[in-house]
Image (cartoon, rainbow, N blue to C red):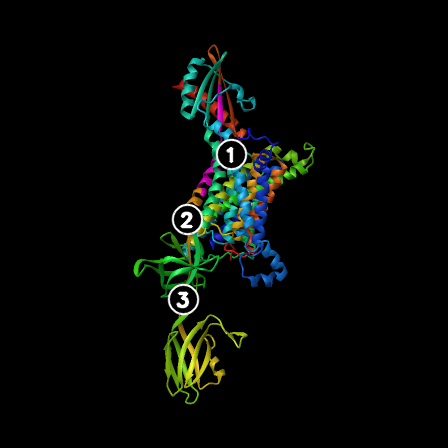
Amino acid sequence: MTESKSTSTPAGALWKKLTSIKLTVWILLTIAAAAVIGTLIPQNKPTVYYQNYFGDRLYAVLSRLDLLDMYHSLWFQALLLLLALNILACSLDRIKTVFKIVFEKTPSFSPNAFSKSGATEPVTIDKPVDQVLPLFRARIKRKFSRTAEQQADNDIFLFAEKGRFSRLGVYIVHSSILVLLAGALIGSLFGFEGYINLPEGETTDHVFLTNSDQPYNLGFSVRCDDFSVSFHDNGQPKEYRSSLSILDGNELVLKKDILVNKPLGFRGVRIFQSSYGTASAKNIDLTFTSRKTGMQYQKTVDIGQAVNLPEDLGKFTANRLLHEYLFQGKHNIGETLIGTLTRGDDREMVALPVKFRGFDKMRQGEVIITVNGLEPVFYTGLQMRNDPGVPLVYAGFLMIIAGIYITFFLSHQRYCVKLTGSGNKTTVTVYGKANKNQTAARNKARMLSHKLTELIINTDTV
Amino acid sequence: MESAFLLSIATFVYGLAVVCYMAGFSFKFKPAEKAGTIVTAAAVMLNLAGIITRWIESHQMGIGHAPLSNLYESLVFFAFSIGAIYLFMEIKFKTRTFGAIAVLLAFIALAYASLSPDIDQQIKPLIPALQSNWLTAHVITCFLGYAAFAIAFGISLLYIGLKRGGDTEKNSLAATLLPPAEVLDDLIYQSVIFGFFFLSIGIITGAVWANTAWGRYWGWDPKETWSLVTWFIYAILLHARLVRGWQGKTIAWISIIGFAAVIFTYFGVNLLPGLHSYQ
């Protein structure tokens, strides 16, 4: 691949650039720097937030540079693409040589390939070569995947190698990154991500897409049967639980409770517990006090219901429960029941804060209304996702872990055992070399020498 | 709490180990260095005993969970990981020269956990987001990675100190005390690959967990992003060394920068909004 392209042609020069490690380092540094900026500038916030935070002019600049939804911007994705190209080019550029070594049918061994630096101290054994050799040969054949034998002058060489495939580890790591990026691309092209706030008792057949807020039809319906939140004694939340029913048309197909770490999956869509809130209220316990007679009347209503009051005081309708309410547009009085008091043609809106019981006296009306208590009707905040890229991404994860292990903790080791016979004595020298960590290879050569000589000593004692 | 007591003893024992290594190192006194190993082993055992005791205590309180859920517990496990990995490396590479600095880092982590008034030591129930079996795998692998990087950082400081001692290495004090530069260089590389392996698994277990809990394996949350930045820095180090054959000072500096990124991933991210801030 490389031989055909000289650097003098533009294509060759481009190829050289694309396969350079310098480019890799620059891409990694740029992605890292960009990613850091993305953690310093809050991403995907509403426009108002940025205008308050940065001012209009800076906001316009940042928005123009795509720094507010950076990770999805074209330029960031172009960087990722460049990284993918760089990895691909580097792998293609080098893999031919490596394949030659790894898939060679008849590897050639030569004593000259081993340097003295990887050699052990020679050990002399009181046995002739023809007695030593079979034992050594058997041992080496058992321990190594490939072996060979050579004779030159007075010396016999036994060659052994293992871990040849470890040379491929680095390509596993690099291609895993391509697999990951491919998985991410598939997910973003063919998957969806949406959310919905679903009150207890209600059913939905759609969600709103996270990136566009457009409704997305699920093809089935989800009903929230119940939502509950429980707390520990110290007030920390213990569990958020939604009881969901999945309906296909009108037919109930699945009933399941989901928790924060326990989603449910249906037809490739996974449903996650994401948030909750108060949607409405039921069994609202109210006290109506007549100003004229001082009589008190207890009534219970649900949101949307109305009650008729005695003494010709009119009718009260519970309209809504608000999480918070600004009284006279400025004072936040917290959770508030909004109701309507109807008396003949008079209609009056009343705001009844749950926390402040005597609040309604201020209205100076004919009747004073107090909220004694209520049962909240929750909504559950559900996230729904479908990501067809996940299997690919997971495959990439496994490849990364396996690849890094192979690349860094295994090596292609080659050993050469030299047997020099003289009369009844044999001198053994072991040479070791590896494609990385030469020190370890030398230590292993020493071990091998030790094990082999031990073999002879052991047969002696038997 | 007995666990807190055990861990404060462990802190002092780590401190004692540092003194032993320093004495052995400065005076070329072998027995003191050997004592360093034994004392470190004792500290690591105490540290582990503290972790296990805290686990038992949480079960006795009826909220049992692995003690890996907040800043205090993570620091305790960080110290343990540094101590354990250091001992492993000491045995594997047969050198005690970086004992003082490695164990010092374990001491600092545990002392910070035990003594800082800002760190809440109480055992608390897990918030719903953390109630998952992935928590244990994710935290253990991440912190094994962080600990290996911490050791690489310590050795890098030694290396740079050695080189600062002057180019006329033979005259400098550091050169007479420290092993040859090549040995330190190799130790930096070995601890970085160990850390890189575990950080990779840590990020991946985090991604798988995020996918099971929230349906996304990557969300550019500050912690995620910073862990990726850290991964990139060490990836650059490995490429510089394996492809370009860079050694020595440059590698030591990249390892120091990498550890700064680790520290920011660990602590600094708490300053930014996100899912990982320790509350």
Q: Secondary structure at mark 3?
A: strand
Q: Is residue A391 left or right of residue B159?
A: left
How many badges with numbers are in the image?
Answer: 3
What amino acid is at disc 3?
Answer: Phe
Is residue A253 shown in magenta? no
- Near mark 1 (Cα within 10 A), the count class, few <14, some 14-19 or many ≥20, is some
Which residue was labeled with disc 3?
A378
What amino acid is at disc 1?
Answer: Leu
Residue A69 on image: x %, y %: 54, 55
Image point (47%, 46%), residue name: B204
3D distance between C-alphas at marks 2 and 1: 28 Å
Quick one: label 2 or label 1, which is nearer the N terminus? 1
Q: Quadrant of residue A255?
A: bottom left
Between B86 and A170, the one nearer to me in the picture: A170
Q: Is residue B259 left or right of residue A250?
A: right
Which of labels 1 and 3 is toward the front? 1
Letter of the chain that mark 1 sits on in the rendering? A
Q: Quadrant of residue A278?
A: bottom left
Residue A93 on image: x %, y %: 53, 33
Which residue was labeled with disc 2?
A388
Q: Which residues are magenta?
A: A396-417
Quick one: label 3 or label 2, which is nearer the N terminus? 3
Which secondary structure type mostly characterizes the magenta part of the structure? Answer: helix
Discs 2 and 1 carry the same chain letter? yes
Residue A248 on image: x %, y %: 32, 58
Furthest residue toward left: A251
What amino acid is at disc 2?
Answer: Pro
Which residue was labeled with disc 1?
A92
Letter of the chain that mark 3 sits on in the rendering? A
Between B241 and B113, the one nearer to me in the picture: B241
* Circle on res. B91: none
3D distance between C-alphas at marks 3 and 2: 32 Å
